[in-house]
Amino acid sequence: MDQAYMGMEDVSGSNVKLRRLVETSEDNSIDDEMSQTVQCETTGLGLPGSEFVKKSYCRAAVILLGLLCLFLLIGLIIVFFLFSQGKSPGEMDTVLLHRLYNNVTCERNQLLTSYNNLKTEKDQLLTSYNNLTTEREQLLTSYNNLKTEKDQLLTSYNNLTTEREQLLTSYNNLKTEKDQLLTSYNNLTTEREQLLTSYNNRKTEKDQLLTSYNNLTTEREQLLTSYNNLKTEKDQLLTSYNNLTTEREQLLTSYNNLKTEKDQLLTSYNNLTTEREQLLTSYNNLKTEKDQLLTSYNNLTTEREQLLTSYNNLKTEKDQLLTSYNNLKTEKDQLLTSYNNLTTEREQLLTSYNNLKTEKNQLLTSYNNLTTEREQLLTSYNNLKTEKDQLLTSYNNLTTEREQLLTSYNNLKTEKDQLLTSYNNLTTEREQLLTSYNNLKTEKDQLLTSYNNLTTEREQLLTSYNNLKTEKDQLLTSYNNLTTEREQLLTSYNNLKTEKDQLLTSYNNLTTEREQLLTSYNNLKTEKNQLLTSYNNLTTEREQLLTSYNNLKTEKDQLLTSYNNLTTEREQLLTSYNNMKTEKDQLLTSYNNLKTEREQLLTSYNNLKTEKNQLLTSYNNKVKERDQLQTRFEDMTKNRDNLQRKLQDCRENWVAFSNSLYLVSSVRKSWEESRQDCLQKGADLMIIKSREQQNFANQFKKSLWIGLTDSETDGTWKWVDGTRMTTSYWKSGEPNGGRIENCGEIRFYNSENSWNDAPCSIEKFWICEKRVSP
C-alpha cells in the first residue's frame, strides 16, 4: 500500500513535471508568438505569411497541450488500475518502469512535437521565402511595366466574369447529366453482370473462360491506352528534349560568340590604352619641342631685331666703320657658330618630322582598324538582339508549360498526401490497438530496451532540433532581408499604379479560371459522349448477350484460342509498356538536365552581356579620349610646323618686314628660274604696292628681279599673284623695251623710282617674299 502510495506520489510528481512542461511550452509558444507579432509590427509587414506563422504557433501549442493531457490521462489510468489490483513489489517495479517509460515517452513526444513544429515552421519559412522571391521578381517586372489601359481591362474583366458564370452553369449541367449517365451505366452494368451470372451457372467452364477473356481484354485495352499515352508523352518529351537541345546549342554558340567578342574588346581596350599612353608621350614630347622652338624663335627674333638695329646704325655711322669693323668680325664669328647650331637643330627637326610622319601612318592604320571593329560590334549587337527575342519567346513558352505541369503536379501531390494521411492514421490506430492488447504482460524487458532506444532517439532528436533551430534562424534572417526588400519594392510599386496590378491580377485569374472551366467543360462533354457511347454499347451488348445466350457452347474453342492470343499480346504489351516507362524516365531526366543547363547558360549569357556592355562603355570612352588626344596632337603638329617654318626662314637669313619675310639671293638667275626658286621655298617674287615696300627693297643696294611682268599682254603689267599694277615706281623713261623687255627689276636703287624693264632671260639677283599671318 505504501509502495502504491509512493507510486502515486511519483506519478503526481511526474504530473507536476508534465504540467510545468506544458506551461513552459505554452509560455514559449506565447513568447514566440509575441516576438513574431512585435517583429511584424516593427517591420511594418501586413503579409498573409506572417499571420500564417502566428497561427501555426497557436496550433502547435494547442496540439502539444492536447497530446500532453492525453498521455497524462493514460498514465493516471494505468496507475489507478495497478493500485486497485494490489500488485506485488515485483509488479510495482513494472509499474515504475511503466512510469519511467511514460516519462521518457512524454519527453520523446515533446521533442518530436518540437521537431515537427520546427520542421513545419522551416517549411513555412521556405514557402514564404520562395513566395517573397517570386513576388519580388513579379514586382520588379510590374515596376518596369507602367500604366496600360484601365478601361479595356475592366471591360475584359466584366466579359470574363459573365463568361465564367455561363461556363459554371454549363459545367453544372454537364456534371448533372454525367451523373445521370453514370447511374444508367451502372444499372446496365449490373444487369449485364446478372446475365453473365446466369450464364456462368449453366456453363461454369465457359464462364471462367469468358471472365478470363474479359479480364484480358480489359487489361489489353488498359495496356494499349497506357502504351499510347506513354508513346504520346514520349513524343512530347522528345520534342521538348530536341527543342531544349537546339536552344542549348544556340545558347552555347551565343556564349562562345560573346566570349570571343569579350576577348576582342579586351584586346582593343588594351591596344587603345597603349595607344593613349603613346599619344600622351608624343603630346608631352611635342609640347617640350614646341617650348624649345618658341625659345629659339624668340632668341632669333631678338637677334634679328638687333641685326636690323645694327644695320640701320651702320647707315648713319659711316665715319665709325673702321672701329666697328673689328666688332662686326667678332659678331660674324658668333653668327657662324649660331648658324652651325641651327643647322644641327634643323637635322634634329627633320628626324622628328619623319617620326611624326610614321606615327601619323600608324594612327591612320589604328583608325581603319577601329572602323572595322565598330562594324563588327554593330553586327554582333544585331545578332544579340535577334537572339534575345528568340530567347524571350522560348522563355515564355517554357513558363506556360511549367505552370500547366505545376498545376497537375500540385493536384496529384494533394491527392497523394490526403491518401497517405488517411492510410497512416488507420495504420497507426491499428498498430496501437494491437500493441496495447498483446504486450501488456511481457513488456518489462521490452520497456528497458525501449528506454535505451528512446534515450538514443532523444539525443538524435535534440541534435535534429538544434539543427532545425539554426536553419530556422538562417531562414528568418533571409526572410527578414527579403521582407525589407519587398517593402521597398512595394512602396515604389504602390506609388506608381496599385490599381493596375489589381486589375491585371484579376484579369489573369479570370483568364486562367476561364481556361480551366473551358477545359473542364470540354472534358465533361467528351466524357458525356463516351458515356453515351458506352451506354449504347452496353445496350447493344445486352441484346447480343441475350441473343448469344443459346449459342455459347460452340464458342469455347474459339475463346480458348483468343485467350491464348490475348495472353501472348498482353505479355508483349507489358514488355512494351515497361520499355516505354524506362524511356520516359530517361527522357524526363534528360529534360531536367537540359533545363538546368539552359538556366545556367542563361545566367552566363546575362553575365557576359553585362560585361560586354561595360567593355563597350570603356571602349567608347577610350575612343573619345584617343580622338581628343589625336586632335591635340594634330594641333601641336601644326604649331610645330609653323615654328619650324619660321625657324627655317630665320636660318636662311630671311628678313622680316611688315607682315612678310624677304630673302635676297646670293646667286644670279633668269626671271623664270628666280621665281621657281622662290616657289620651292614656299614664297614668290616680291610684290610692291606701297612706298614703304619700295624703300625697303631699295636698301639692299642690288639689281633685283621683282614679281612684275607683261609677258601675257604687252604693255599690261601684272604682279605674280595675277593682280594688275596700280602703283608704280618706274625710272623716268621706263618702261621702254616693248616686246623684248617683259620683266621688271629694281635697278636704280639710289633713287625712289628705281624700276626698269629688262629681258627675262638675263641672269640677275632676285628677292623672294613669303606672307606671314599677323
Image (cartoon, rainbow, N blue to C red):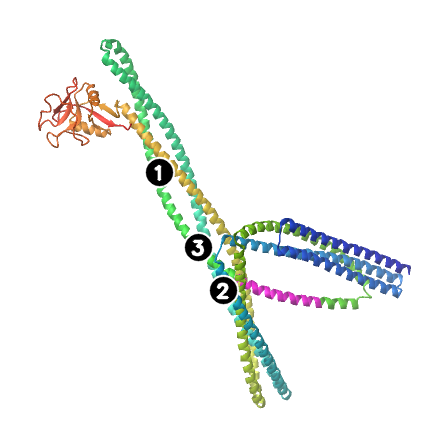
Residue 201 appearing in the image:
yes
Say what secondary structure mark 3 lies in. helix
Residue picked out by circle 2: 238
Residue 734 against residue 611 in the figure, above or below: above
Labels 3 & 1 near each other (Cβ < 8 A)? no
Q: Are marks 2 and 3 in contact (CB under 8 Å)?
A: no
Amino acid at dot 3: Glu
Q: In what element is the residue under mark 1?
A: helix
Name the residue nearer the viewer: 239 or 502.
502
Q: Can see residue 112? A: no
Q: Which x, y percent locates residue 367?
A: 36, 41
The amino acid sitting under disc 1 is Gln
Q: Is residue 408 magenta?
A: yes
Which percent across, then down, holds residue 547? 56, 89
Q: Earlier in the sequence, mark 2 or mark 3?
A: 2
Q: Which residues are magenta?
A: 401-426
How far is the residue under mark 2 from the one under mark 3? Answer: 23 Å
User: What residue do we see at 54% from left, 85% from top?
Assistant: 540
**Mark before the other along the chain sequence, 1 or 2:** 2
Magenta stretch contains residue 260: no
Which quarter of the image is occupied by the N terminus?
A: bottom right
Distance, label 1 to label 2, CA atoms, is 57 Å
Closest to the camera, between mark 3 and mark 1, is 3
Q: Position of residue 646 (x, y in %)?
A: 29, 26
In contact (CB < 8 Å): disc 1 and disc 2: no
For label 3, the crowd category at 10 Å Cα-Cα, with few meaning under 14, some 14 to 19 and many 20 or more, is: some
Q: Nearer the viewer, residue 68 or 224?
A: 68
Q: Residue 362: which numbered mark, if any? A: 1
Res 328 → quadrant: top left
What secondary structure characterizes most of the magenta part?
A: helix
